Every structure is written in structure tokens, then in C-alpha cells.
Image (cartoon, coloured by chain):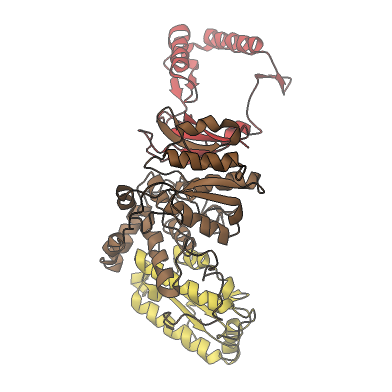
Amino acid sequence: MEYQTVRTTCTYCGTGCGVLLEVLDGEVVGTLPQKDHPINEGKLCIKGWSAHEFIYADGRLTKPLIRKDGKLVEASWEEAVGLVAKKLLELKEKHGPDSLGCFSSAKCTNEENYLLQKIFRAVIGTNNVDHCARL
Amino acid sequence: MDKLKNHVKELLESGEIAGFLGLIDDGGHPVPYLFTKEHLDRLDAMVVPDFRYPMTDILLRIVRKYPEETIGVMVRGCDDRALVELAKNQRIFPELVRPVGIACTKEMAEACRCSQPYPREIHYGEKVEGVNDRSDLAAVESKPLDERLDYWMGQFSKCIKCYGCRNICSMCFCDQCTLEDETLIMTGQSPPEIPIFHLIRAFHMAGRCIDCGLCEEACPAHIPLRSLYRKVREDMADYFGYVTGMDESEKDPLEFLGSEGYEVPSKIDET
Amino acid sequence: MADAEKGFEPKIIAFCCNWCSYAGADLAGSMRLKYPPNVLPIRVMCSGRISPHFILKAFQKGADGVLVTGCHYGDCHYIKGNYITKRRVTVMKDLLKFVGIDPRRLKSEWIAGSEGDKFARVATEFTEEIRALGPSPLRG
């Protein structure tokens, strides 16, 4: 019998609410708002309250998949990233850099977000940069 | 504090309880934690902060998975009232829960406007008298009906439908929630249908709410939910002499007619 | 507003228990007693089945008044449903008043299967009461 709470930050948007993930015998079973957090002061929105639900969701993507002949097939990271790079370059050649854009995510770190916008601005050459956390 | 820690240690060591649900210091932040016999050293970091987590809510999670174990839990006055109600509603076996009581300080009691800031049995802290303050209800009642409705609709319209009031509530233990019933309340929209969303919950709190105030603390929109629930709680006391969280043998008058036969309490006017 | 132009016609939901009040309403019909068409009866098995949520739902959807009817005390087909209903309605009225909805918009009445005349009378009186109170503030 083990129950503990893990202090962390909600991944759903950029606000940065403090949440406690409730872990019962190694399984994440719930979320609580962190009462003494300076940002959310013990409050959460509906996304924060369900911040644990995606962890064991059936539809959660855990490995790269590539659609081959209409079917999603598991692939290695090298193959997946290679394919994305190839297609992006092809599109840029054919339709110009502004035919491309990127969505970044609040679930990534600041550094990862920085890198994504950098590659789209500097390498691809477009300002079509956005993110999932438009609330 | 040492006395409290030793008490918990004894309970754990003697095997009287399989675990103790309390709060532990995690990098300067008190968070809920289940102390066990295997990690007695963690007791050194046990803390009693001046804010509350929904202890009985967490207890229910553990009890659902380990229904046959005896579990100790740190309770304040409000948590203790919750334990009484949970026992009434057959969510816990009271003999399998070992409450370790914390009396709230005067400051906390006043901040919470708590009528009973101490549990049945106190293991830590000094008992202070409760605060009887119905100024929040009186403020609403001093308004004429149309102003009241404007006031409440204004408050309700701030709702972002986070379900925080329900999620944090010690008394919200149902498997199915009316607030998610699409035949009663339009689902999939925010703000929710008002006032029905809040009134359904308010009515549901009649004979149940233990007046802990966690709902209001958890509300991101600062809706004075607690006044609503205090109102129905007061009604239950006025009409039926029923005060939640006091006696495990009493039954909710809105669900059971009670031992005094089928008489309708005299205070109900027959109009 | 359309209501103001053609005069206010209240919308009233009447929850009637299957065993007494609905039979009473039926009898009112058989007796050719006239009662206002503003009252819309909904048959439920027992007044104890009338969840407070139904009452709130009726108000939410724009009902100007809600009439809860059941068997007289001691006559309940399920022995005690109407006692519980009375208690719930009492608390509900207080809650409605607290949030600023006139508690007179909610009424409970006990009507037996033989009291067709009482049903017609209660329906008429309640409709007039609600007419005097005006449209519900929750009417969209």
C-alpha cells in the first residue's frame, strides 16, 4: 500500500498551475490542485483537474507511426524524422516556405519550443508559428 | 508535534493501522502522503500546515482499493464531520478508520468561519471555540428577490465549469454525477446552464454538506458557493433539527423518514 | 415582447402521481370540469419520484410555476413517498427564495383520485396566482 503525491506543473497551457498527481501503488489515479502554489492558489480549471487522464488513455501515441498503404505502421524515430524532413523540404521547394507552418505545444519545455520556432523561422523561412495553448 | 509523530509511529509499529494518511513536507510544500511501517523515517518530515487538502476524499481512494485494511487519517474538525457522513452513507467502515485529530487555531477557525474547528478526539493543538457567523447569508437575505436573482446570476455566470467544487468535495462520492447528466443539464458548453447547474448541486448538498468550505477555496471564479450550501444546511437544522456530521446514527431526513414515524415536522407550513 | 402584446399566459408544469393526483386530473376531465390550459400535467409514478432536479429543470426551461401533487398523507401507494416530497419541496422553496426566485412559484398540493373538483380548483387558483406574479425571471 503506497500513496504519494507528486508535485508538478499542469501541462495543458502556459499558465503553469501547480498540481499534485496522486499516485496509488505506482499508478497515477488523480489530480489535486496545489494549495500553496503562487500561481493557482489551490484552484484548477477542468483541464487541470483531468491532467492525469491522458496518461493511460488508449489513444495515446507512444511510438512514431507512418502511414504506409493507408495503414499506420510503427516506425523508428530515424525513419519518422527523416520522412518529415524530406516532405517538408519537398513542399518548401514546390510551394515556397509560407506554405508551411508549425504548431508547438505547452507540453514541451521552453527550450524545445524555442528550437521548433527557430527551425521554422531560420531553416524553413516562415513566420507561420503557433501553439496549442491559445486560451 | 513530537507527541503527534510518536502517536502515529506507535499506531503504525503496533500494526493497528496499515497506513497513515497525513501531510509531508516536500521541498517546503506540505502535500498529502500515506505514511507506512516500511518508511517510518518519513515521519520526521510530517507537517501540519495551516491550509487543508481534502483528506477524506483521498482516504476514499485508498479505502476503495484496500477495503479491509485499517487506515489512520489526519483529521480536522471538518474532516471528522466528513467521516461521520461517509459512515452514514456507507462509504467507509468507521471501525476501519483511525482518525488522528488536529484542532485548528483561532486564526484558521476565523478564516474558515468554522462552527466546529475541532474533531471529536484531539491529538494535536488546542481546542478553540467555533465561530457562528451567518453574515454572508444575512447579506443576501437583506436584498429584495429581484436583486438577489441578479446577484446570483451574476455570480453563476462567472462559472468556468471546472467541476472543482464537486471534485474537491468530501461529500461528492457518487459514481454517477447529476451535473454530467445531459437529460438535466445541457452538456458540452461553458459557462454551464445557470442557475440549474449550481442549484442542483446546492440542493444535493442539503443534508450532506459539512460546511468545510473547500469548494469555495477551489473555485477559480470566486463564486460564493458556500453561502448556498450553508443556507440549505441551516434549513435542514431549522426544519428537521438535522445537523450533518454530528451523529452517525442519524439519517438524512430528505431520504429517510426517521424513527419518529411518518409525521411531517411541525415547522413545515402546509401551504 | 410577445407576452406583453397578447397578455401574459403562464406556463405551469404539474407533476402528478400516478395513483391519486393523475387520477384526480382524469376525473376532472370526465366530470367536464374546466381548468386552465396553462397547466401541463406530467405523470410520475409517485410524488416521491419527483426529484428536486425536475423542479429546477422546469424552472430552467422557462416554467412560470411548478405544481407538485401527490396522494394525501397516509394514502401514498408506496406508503411514504409524499412525506419525503413535502420535505424536499420545503427545502427547495427556501433555496429558490434564497437565490431570488419567488417561492410561491412552487406549490405542493395533495389531491386524491376522487377529488377531480379539487384538481380543477387548485389548477385554476395556482394559474391565477402565477398570472399575478408575472412571467418567471428565468424565462428566456
Residue A90 or B26: which is nearer the viewer?
Answer: B26
Q: Decide: is A49 above or below A70.
A: below
- Residue B157 appearing in the image: yes
Q: Residue at x 42, y 30 (%)?
A: A134
Image quarter for residue C16?
bottom right
Q: Is residue B95 left or right of residue B199?
A: right
In the image, residue A102 above or below residue C65: above
Q: Quadrant of the C terminus of chain A?
A: top left
Q: Which chain is brown?
A: B
Which residue shows up at 35% across the image and 48% down it? B222
Q: Is residue A18 toward the left or the right of residue C25 in the image?
A: left
x and y, in percent, of residue A115 in the image:
46, 12
Q: Chain C: what color?
A: yellow
Q: Colour of chain A?
A: red
- On the image, the x and y values in percent for residue B214 come to 42, 49
Viewer can see residue B219: no
